[in-house]
């Protein structure tokens, strides 16, 4: 910056030669314009500003008799000439300057504007770093490139690409734009992997471009953002076409410079037109209006057909009117256009620098405020500034360059993002920038394909992918080094190789073993090696856990892997009283009590109206007991009549149904599933105990138990192999081992005296690790899904991990043995024996009575065989229920229906006599 000001002093030193001594026109409102008029935007701006000047002056009363005078200065790509032009304007009482055209000059001249209070308005110097805080007198009258970079980042994210290459001219405008693009991409988890800087436009040569494009061609990203100017941009596309970088697979984004070429340069050569086919570009969006249509119709006569109109011409026209309206307001406010000497410059004094010629615009601050208060409808649409001085509703057209011109595929606006609907139609709706609401029409990409390019390839630089593989010393079925060589095999390796075959491109790779071979390596360190760029990927039994996902990207899991607890178990022998185990003693007691309660309640509700619940006290008690317990099998015969009784019975039967089902299911499990006993019930019982716990060396289980479960590290014991697991568990050195499910499954296939206790208490899986935002991780995930769907993943699992060493011990487990049921048979047998014994007692008693009542036999020498024969006949004889019932009634003074004793009359005596004779 000091060099710049020295240049200014140099110019002032030769003031007599370069500034001149022309007197300002007091009847004119002087405005300066600094552009390179040989460029497309310079030509368009010159025509548009001249048209606006004429339109303002067409109304002589607009400035109260004054006229607008715009002085054009051609900087001709030279910053030095731009400074000279600005100083010339400052000497001639200029109230505002339109320009400069490029941002580099804007940074320099804004210091001059700040000092002399002359507003500078530019619609082409759109560098995002031109801050109004640093340069308060500089105003961008077109959307800042900040929004253009946001639009590019949104498109890259919309298409799902994660890495891009940028090519730019090494000047303030392009360099700062690319910096902002990098920030915006980072917010979307994308990044710029290489920045190709070319000499400032138009000084870049073909060799400069070839050198950079050859570097880019060797890189993996095929998404290229070109942020430069016309001459350099067309040169880049021409060289890229010759190098084959406009073929299928490449993606090119060009900023608004390309749309200006397409809109304005009708003389574009067929070679240039062919080289840009398939590129995407942005163009400042200007809504359709009658004023815009009328101006477009005037354009041909204004330009004499030398150049086409582009959006910058509309913004140039509007910028002139913004100044004109601001000056008019300034004059209407009663202000005068006046200038005064700068005391700072005056005090410098000395020499022939002619510093007195530079004066401060006294009304500069007020004019600037008037500009910022602009609220009008211009050719470019509604013009209004936000508090941060950005224009309201910045928006762009998204265009796709085709063989015969271009196609508009959508729009971008800061309000609604990407859309196929014009932004002005969305302003009345609530803003919605969710990913599901972003849309663009189909694109014809480089090479003439409509299929979205993948956006990356493996770099064509002869380097192979360095894949880190853990050198395991245990559980070698997953990853195994073969006989001390660098060759590896195992389940994880086979899964990776199978997935690699499904990728739509070749993946050159080499496996690099990680670890000392004496113990299992730390998998977290292995993943850190990817972040440190030592490995390009990691393949193996790598658990996907939170702290690792922060430093690397993982594929979709190819096997489930959560932490489980394994402990010694004791097999429970089958018990004769196993049928009692489904319920606890309390449950048995409560169930039995409820059987009695329900029976009693139903008896109370039915006793007075239902004959089946009446009778002697003994009978009614038996009825209650029978009815209650028969409901267990839904075998009750007594009908319920009362409504309340039926409601109680229905509810009780539902309860019995649930109890029966639960009992049956539990008993089935007890009798058919092997029952194992262990004091360890799961991770919860381990946490509350103080017993030592084992874990596998290198596993994340240690950190998880310490950090997540708050288990003291002193309780954890590292174990290196399945044999150490078994030895530590059997000796009691650890009460349980916590490890991942796949390892434990292999361990238990050879050690059946242990078992998993409780449920899996974490949910995770194993995946392959890649650098952050690596597109290969996405493609590998897709390949793993395909392996799962076609069954290949299951075949690999079966080939390596299906172990059945303990299967012979479970043979015959579906058969039930007598040992499990002899308790039931014992209860049934005892019941039968007691019932038969009681029956024999009662029948002998009846037979004895019968023998006393029967007449004496005619033969006195009856033998024991005869008595036995009589007894057997008596037992075989059917008992007359009515007879026995009648006898009981007579002997006990039968009770009538109201519970009163009934006396015996003559008919009863007669009936007894008949019975006695029988």
Image (spheres, rainbow, N blue to C red):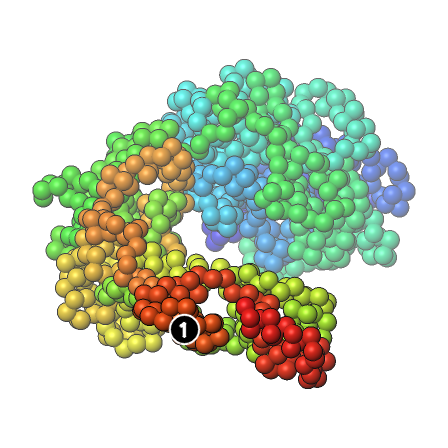
Residue at horizontal 36 percent and vertical 71 percent from the top: 860
Left or right: 592 with respect to 620? left
x%, y% of residue 186? Answer: 47, 49
Q: How would you rate the neighbour count of disc 1 (Cα within 10 Å): few for under 14, some for 14-19, many for 20 or more?
A: some
Q: Nearer the viewer, residue 688 or 285?
A: 688
Q: Nearer the viewer, residue 303 or 345?
A: 303
- Residue lying furthest left in this view? 483
Q: Is residue 846 among what the camera can see?
A: no
User: Considering only vertical position in the picture, is 806 above or below 644?
Assistant: above
Quadrant that contains the C terminus: bottom right
Q: Nearer the viewer, residue 373 or 446?
A: 446
Q: Quadrant of residue 214?
A: top left
Residue at horizontal 66 percent and vertical 44 percent from the top: 416
Residue of label 1: 844
Residue at horizontal 22 percent and vertical 46 percent from the top: 803
Q: Nearer the viewer, residue 323 or 356?
A: 323
Left or right: 317 with respect to 491? right
Q: Is residue 714 among what the camera can see?
A: yes
Asked which secondary structure carries label 1, the reply is helix
x%, y% of residue 443? Answer: 56, 27
- Residue lying furthest top in this view? 270
x%, y% of residue 141? Answer: 68, 44
Number of numbered labels in the structure image:
1
Q: Quadrant of residue 867?
A: bottom left
x%, y% of residue 629? Answer: 52, 68
Residue at horizontal 53 percent and vertical 33 percent from the top: 254
């Amino acid at each position: 910056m000091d060099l710049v000001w020295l240049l200014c002093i140099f110019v002032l030193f030769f003031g007599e030669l370069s500034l001149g001594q022309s007197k300002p026109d007091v009847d004119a409102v002087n405005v300066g314009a600094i552009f390179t008029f040989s460029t497309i935007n310079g030509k368009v701006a010159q025509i548009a500003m001249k048209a606006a000047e004429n339109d303002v002056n067409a109304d002589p009363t607009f400035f109260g008799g004054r006229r607008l005078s715009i002085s054009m200065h051609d900087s001709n790509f030279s910053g030095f000439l731009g400074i000279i032009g600005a100083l010339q304007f400052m000497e001639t009482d200029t109230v505002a300057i339109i320009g400069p055209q490029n941002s580099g000059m804007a940074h320099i001249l804004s210091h001059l504007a700040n000092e002399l209070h002359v507003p500078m308005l530019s619609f082409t110097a759109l560098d995002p770093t031109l801050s109004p805080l640093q340069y308060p007198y500089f105003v961008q009258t077109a959307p800042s490139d900040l929004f253009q970079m946001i639009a590019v980042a949104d498109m890259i994210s919309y298409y799902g690409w994660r890495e891009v290459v940028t090519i730019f001219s090494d000047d303030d405008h392009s360099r700062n734009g690319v910096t902002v693009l990098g920030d915006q991409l980072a917010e979307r988890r994308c990044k710029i992997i290489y920045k190709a800087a070319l000499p400032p436009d138009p000084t870049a040569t073909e060799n400069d471009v070839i050198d950079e494009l050859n570097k880019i061609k060797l890189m993996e990203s095929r998404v290229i953002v070109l942020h430069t100017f016309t001459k350099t941009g067309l040169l880049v596309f021409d060289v890229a076409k010759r190098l084959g970088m406009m073929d299928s697979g490449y993606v090119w984004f060009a900023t608004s410079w390309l749309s200006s070429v397409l809109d304005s340069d009708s003389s574009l050569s067929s070679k240039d037109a062919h080289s840009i086919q398939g590129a995407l570009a942005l163009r400042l969006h200007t809504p359709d209006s009658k004023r815009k249509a009328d101006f477009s119709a005037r354009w041909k006569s204004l330009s004499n057909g030398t150049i086409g109109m582009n959006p910058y011409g509309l913004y140039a026209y509007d910028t002139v009117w913004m100044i004109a309206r601001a000056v008019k307001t300034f004059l209407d406010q009663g202000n005068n256009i006046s200038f005064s000497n700068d005391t700072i410059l005056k005090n410098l004094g000395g020499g022939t620098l002619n510093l007195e010629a530079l004066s401060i615009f006294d009304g500069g601050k007020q004019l600037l405020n008037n500009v910022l208060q602009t609220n009008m409808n211009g050719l470019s649409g509604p013009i209004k500034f936000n508090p941060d001085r950005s224009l309201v509703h910045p928006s762009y057209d998204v265009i796709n360059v085709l063989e015969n011109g271009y196609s508009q595929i959508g729009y971008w606006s800061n309000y609604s993002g990407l859309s196929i609907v014009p932004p002005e139609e969305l302003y009345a709706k609530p803003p919605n920038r969710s990913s599901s609401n972003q849309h663009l029409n189909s694109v014809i990409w480089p090479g003439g394909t409509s299929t979205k390019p993948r956006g990356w390839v493996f770099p064509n630089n002869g380097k192979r992918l360095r894949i880190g593989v853990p050198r395991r010393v245990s559980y070698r079925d997953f990853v195994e080094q073969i006989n001390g060589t660098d060759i590896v095999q195992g389940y994880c390796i086979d899964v990776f190789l199978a997935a690699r075959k499904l990728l739509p491109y070749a993946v050159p790779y080499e496996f690099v073993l990680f670890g000392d071979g004496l113990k299992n390596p730390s998998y977290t360190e292995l993943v850190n090696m990817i972040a440190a760029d030592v490995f390009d990927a990691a393949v193996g039994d790598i658990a996907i856990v939170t702290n690792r996902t922060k430093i690397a990207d993982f594929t979709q899991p190819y096997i489930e892997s959560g932490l489980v607890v394994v402990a010694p178990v004791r097999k429970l022998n089958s018990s004769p009283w196993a049928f009692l185990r489904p319920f606890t003693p309390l449950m048995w007691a409560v169930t039995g009590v409820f059987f009695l309660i329900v029976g009693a309640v139903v008896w109370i509700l039915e006793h007075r109206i239902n004959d089946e619940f009446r009778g002697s006290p003994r009978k009614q008690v038996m009825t209650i007991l029978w009815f209650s317990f028969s409901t267990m099998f839904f075998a009750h015969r007594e009908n319920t009549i009362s409504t309340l009784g039926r409601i109680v019975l229905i509810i009780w039967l539902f309860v019995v149904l649930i109890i029966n089902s639960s009992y049956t299911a539990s008993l089935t499990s007890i009798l058919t599933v092997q029952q194992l006993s262990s004091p360890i019930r799961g991770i919860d019982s381990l946490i509350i105990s103080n017993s030592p716990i084992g874990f596998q060396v290198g596993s994340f289980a240690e950190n998880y138990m310490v950090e997540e479960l708050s288990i003291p590290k002193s309780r954890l014991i590292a174990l290196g192999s399945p044999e150490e697991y078994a030895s530590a568990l059997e000796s009691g050195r650890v009460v349980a081992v916590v490890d991942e499910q796949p390892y434990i499954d292999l361990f238990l296939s050879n050690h059946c005296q242990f078992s998993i206790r409780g449920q899996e208490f974490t949910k995770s899986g194993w995946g392959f690790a890649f650098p952050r935002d690596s597109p290969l991780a996405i493609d590998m995930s897709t390949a793993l899904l395909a392996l799962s769907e076609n069954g290949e993943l299951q075949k690999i699992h079966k080939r390596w991990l299906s172990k059945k060493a303990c299967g012979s011990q479970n043979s015959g487990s579906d058969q039930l043995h007598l040992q499990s049921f002899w308790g039931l048979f014992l209860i049934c047998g005892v019941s039968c024996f007691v019932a038969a014994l009681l029956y024999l007692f009662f029948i002998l008693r009846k037979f004895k009575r019968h023998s006393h009542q029967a007449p004496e036999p005619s033969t006195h020498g009856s033998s024991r065989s005869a008595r036995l024969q009589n007894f057997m006949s008596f037992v075989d004889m059917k008992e007359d229920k009515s007879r026995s019932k009648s006898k009981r009634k007579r002997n006990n003074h039968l009770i009538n229906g109201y519970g009163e004793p009934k006396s015996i009359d003559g008919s009863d005596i007669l009936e007894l006599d008949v019975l006695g004779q029988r």
